[in-house]
């Protein structure tokens, strides 16, 4: 019975050789596709992990509309889970009617969110700037002008390089904002000396693990009282001056 069945199978294959080859090729291609897809996911994860580890991407960013000062930074650093906390500045600028740029502060000594240089060199002076490699309209050596803004002391820079930032995973999307069109076109990095606000706008912390959400909740709890305290720190001295001037007027 087995011999008869085997002979019949061989006969069917012989009479429909083209169909048999097609089925084998389809199975082979399907297997190769499955193996490729299964291997691609881990490879992409490993590549991303290696890139973020090499650039030392921070786990989270702490921001405040009033800015963060040294007291806030010290409070963050007291958390036992925080390995590194670094201050930085960021301003969003409407460079033209259809172009919005986010300018970040650059510090040579920074350990977090390190830039990957594509061409040129990193800023060495307050009037030097590096641009996102998406900024195709500019080249190294160009004069780069920004409109007047409260966040920057320097308005005219020299483009000295192009970079990639680990803060932006997508090669096309640079995030949204409430400035201009609502879409950030590209980013730039200028030295901290180019910023005129002594309050740090952001602080990043570095320790990547599965408890980031838990760590975030703990930091939020630790900083819960700081908005009211920060408001008092900014307003109370001004109110005191007003009271003194009113007292002088009453005399």
Image (tube, rainbow, N blue to C red):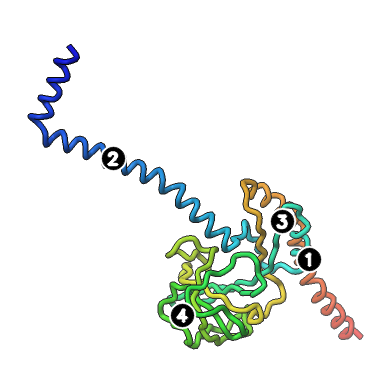
Residue corresponding to mark 3: 82
Residue corresponding to mark 2: 30
The quadrant of the rendering that contains the N terminus is: top left
Mark toward the viewer: 2 or 1: 2
Q: Are marks 1 and 3 in contact (CB under 8 Å)?
A: no
The quadrant of the rendering that contains the C terminus is: bottom right
Residue at the image position 49 percent from the left and 64 percent from the top: 175
Distance (Cα) linking label 4 and label 3: 39 Å
Residue at the extreme right of the image, as rendered: 251
- Secondary structure beneath disc 3? loop
Mark toward the viewer: 4 or 1: 1
Residue corresponding to mark 4: 96
Residue 94, percent across and down? 51, 77
Mark toward the viewer: 2 or 4: 2
Q: Residues within 10 Å of mark 4 (few under 14, many from 20)?
A: few
Task: Answer above or below: position of 163 versus 142.
Answer: above
Q: Residues within 10 Å of mark 2 (few under 14, many from 20)?
A: few
Residue 247, percent across and down? 89, 81
Q: Are marks 2 and 1 in contact (CB under 8 Å)?
A: no
Residue corresponding to mark 1: 71
């Amino acid at each position: 019975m087995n011999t008869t069945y085997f002979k019949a199978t061989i006969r069917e294959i012989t009479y429909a050789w083209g169909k048999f080859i097609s089925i084998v090729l389809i199975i082979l291609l399907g297997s190769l596709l499955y193996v490729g897809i299964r291997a691609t996911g881990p490879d992409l994860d490993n590549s991303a992990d290696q890139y973020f580890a090499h650039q030392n991407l921070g786990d989270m960013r702490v921001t405040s509309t009033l800015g963060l000062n040294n007291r806030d930074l010290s409070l963050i650093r007291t958390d036992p889970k925080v390995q590194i906390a670094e201050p930085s500045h960021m301003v969003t600028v409407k460079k033209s009617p259809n172009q919005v740029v986010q300018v970040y502060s650059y510090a040579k000594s920074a350990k977090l969110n390190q830039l990957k240089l594509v061409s040129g060199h990193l800023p060495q002076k307050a009037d030097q700037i590096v641009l996102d490699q998406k900024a195709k309209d500019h080249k190294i050596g160009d004069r780069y002008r920004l409109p007047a803004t409260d966040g920057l002391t320097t308005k005219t820079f020299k483009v000295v390089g192009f970079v990639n930032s680990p803060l932006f995973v997508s090669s096309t999307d640079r995030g949204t904002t409430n400035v201009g069109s609502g879409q950030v076109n590209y980013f730039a990095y200028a030295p901290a000396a180019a910023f005129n606000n002594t309050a740090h706008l952001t602080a990043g912390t570095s320790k990547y693990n599965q408890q980031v959400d838990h760590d975030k909740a703990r930091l939020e709890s630790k900083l819960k009282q700081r908005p009211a305290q920060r408001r008092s720190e900014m307003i109370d001295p001004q109110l005191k001056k007003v009271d003194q001037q009113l007292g002088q007027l009453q005399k």
